Image (cartoon, rainbow, N blue to C red):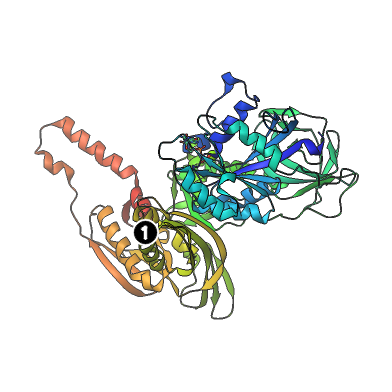
Amino acid sequence: TDPAAIRNFCIIAHIDHGKSTLADRMLQITEVVDPRQMRAQYLDRMDIERERGITIKSQAVRLPWTVRDGDRTGEQVVLNMIDTPGHVDFTYEVSRSLAACEGAILLVDAAQGIEAQTLANLYLAMENNLTIIPVLNKIDLPAAQPEKYAEELAHLIGCEPEDCLRVSGKTGDGVSHLLDEIVRQLPAPTGGDAKAPARAMIFDSVYDVYRGVVTYIRVIDGRLDARDRIKMMSTGAVHELLEIGVISPEPIKSPSLSVGEVGYLITGVKDVRQSRVGDTVTLNSRPATQALGGYKDPKPMVYSGLYPLDGSDYPELREALDKLKLNDASLVYEPETSAALGFGFRCGFLGLLHLEIIQERLEREFGLDLIATAPNVVYRVVTDDGKEITVTNPSEYPHGKVAEVYEPVARATVLTPNDYVGAVMELCQGRRGVLQGMDYLSADRVELRYTLPLGEIIFDFFDQLKSRTKGYASLDYEPNGEQASELVKVDILLQGEPVDAFSAIVHKDKAYAYGTTIASKLQKLIPRQQFEVPIQAAIGSRVIARETIRAIRKDVLAKCYGGDISRKRKLLEKQKEGKKRMKMVGRVEVPQEAFIAALSTA
Ligand code: GDP
Ligand code: MG
């Protein structure tokens, strides 16, 4: 295809503002999907994406289009649409997808207005020098206020309110006009050099059981032919090309991909780590000398221990993690042993959603029952003798000889209606946040910028924000360096023995609250035993909270007054079942749910 007849664009929006629905309408209007095959969220292929209604992996689709109206009526073009994941955990993938485009549709729900991720994505698009087409979506909704939000949007990006297009992804209203405007307003990818050595940027890479790794690329210079041998510029690894082609929206083989084109390639490698997002593909026979910018190793921000509920499932868990890793270069894990939970893995994730998704996939796709320990961030600890330790698990925290501790910090943006500014500030201050700036986006909507310890955001911050603002505030954050803090490790002891799975690293002003909360929760969750069980929270050897579970004689049969044998048997069976879900911690039986309940709401 002549680059002048290509338009590469993405759709960026806050979550739920309608990207996937709009993408569906585009597939329909351009007739690339047979009407009988059409289903909602066509491009979200993973079960979990469909059920949660979120996009995790990017998708690229080629849409042939003939302009319908205006001065360019009849002009034939190829539109490459890239649907991007909208969640903060996957920002790096979003930014790579953006780098593969010349333009972006900035989609805003006409009943909601601008939200935190609208801004975050807009800034990413601007950093990538994309041409932006502002679009208000869901104009079919009775609650839509397109006039009001066109003002807001125009003010934000510096255009006229009339420049904001209006569509409904649901009814299809305005979508054909939007496609025409993409052709008119977005630049064609004419900047590349067709004669130069080939360079293509990888913006996504997925593992397919049948075909191995499928790599999505945008050709910047030169041309890739189906018979070439390609070279990954970051590693120098050379692979045979088995297939190249375009997605429309099913894969279609093609003999070559040239300047400006978007498509896929398959080399037969089995591990996405060999074909990483952001890397540059070139030809082995005539390699480029300079890689395209933008390759970054994903860095885990949140760690959690994953343990099989049934210890004998450990080998299955290892195998399942190995398989998921083929499809997710950002997942890291290593074996770990917990005195309380047995054998498991310490896993690193990009964020909380990433953790949830991996846990859910392990349970669903591999049939495992898992316990995830409370998530924690990564601490850098400098000891008295000048050694530096990276702590990804509270149990590794060196006792007594800590000189300095550094915790990761995030830059957070909260958008909220005026009325809730006080509530948001109170929440952020309670989480050790520092206000960096505040702007009015319109008369009644405020943008608050804070720096906050990342560790304070990963525990129920988002839920708190939603409940304190009746759901109206939105949040976006990104990691932004580290700071020295006064942190301590709080241990929880049962009968004088510390239980590793309950330890946490917290700010010293919050240690007391953490200790009392956990101790009293455990006091309620752990059933009485044959002996007294003291529960203590301690910092080093200093006890800061104490509860006691009193002893009972647990003679269930005594209640039956003899006689009814079947009732006796039932009781015995019940007691046995109760036992199965207990973990022995020292001499104390701790029910499985104590680990989950005490940790998840800490
Ligand atoms: P995404 O998270 O940006 O991909 O958003 P989705 O496309 O999944 O849409 C989120 C929700 O908004 C879904 O319930 C859609 O059915 C609904 N939705 C999307 N577009 C429209 C629209 O134009 N009108 C109405 N009424 N609902 C819409
Ligand atoms: Mg979506």
Depth order, front residue of 86/578: 86
Residue 575 in percent (x, y) is at 25, 41
Quadrant (top left/top right/bottom left/bottom right) for the C terminus: bottom left
Q: Residue furthest top?
A: 36
Residue 583 in percent (x, y) is at 36, 50
Depth order, front residue of 26/465: 26
Q: Is residue 193 visible?
A: yes
Q: Residue type at mark 1?
A: Tyr
| Relative horizontal placement of residue 327, taking residue 339 as reference (left or right) | right
Q: Which residue is mark 1?
A: 420
Residue 288 in percent (x, y) is at 86, 50
Tag 1: Cα neighbours inside 10 Å, few (<14), some, or many (≥20)? some
Quadrant in the picture for residue 459: bottom left
Depth order, front residue of 412/327: 412
Quadrant in the picture for residue 225: top right
Residue 92 in percent (x, y) is at 62, 52
Q: Is residue 218 above or below residue 296?
A: above
| Relative horizontal placement of residue 594, taking residue 375 as reference (left or right) | left
| Relative horizontal placement of residue 462, taking residue 67 as reference (left or right) | left
User: What's the residue at 57%, 70% (across, down)?
Assistant: 389
Q: Is residue 333 visible?
A: no
| Relative horizontal placement of residue 480, taking residue 395 as reference (left or right) | right
Quadrant in the picture for residue 487: bottom left
* SS under mark 1: helix
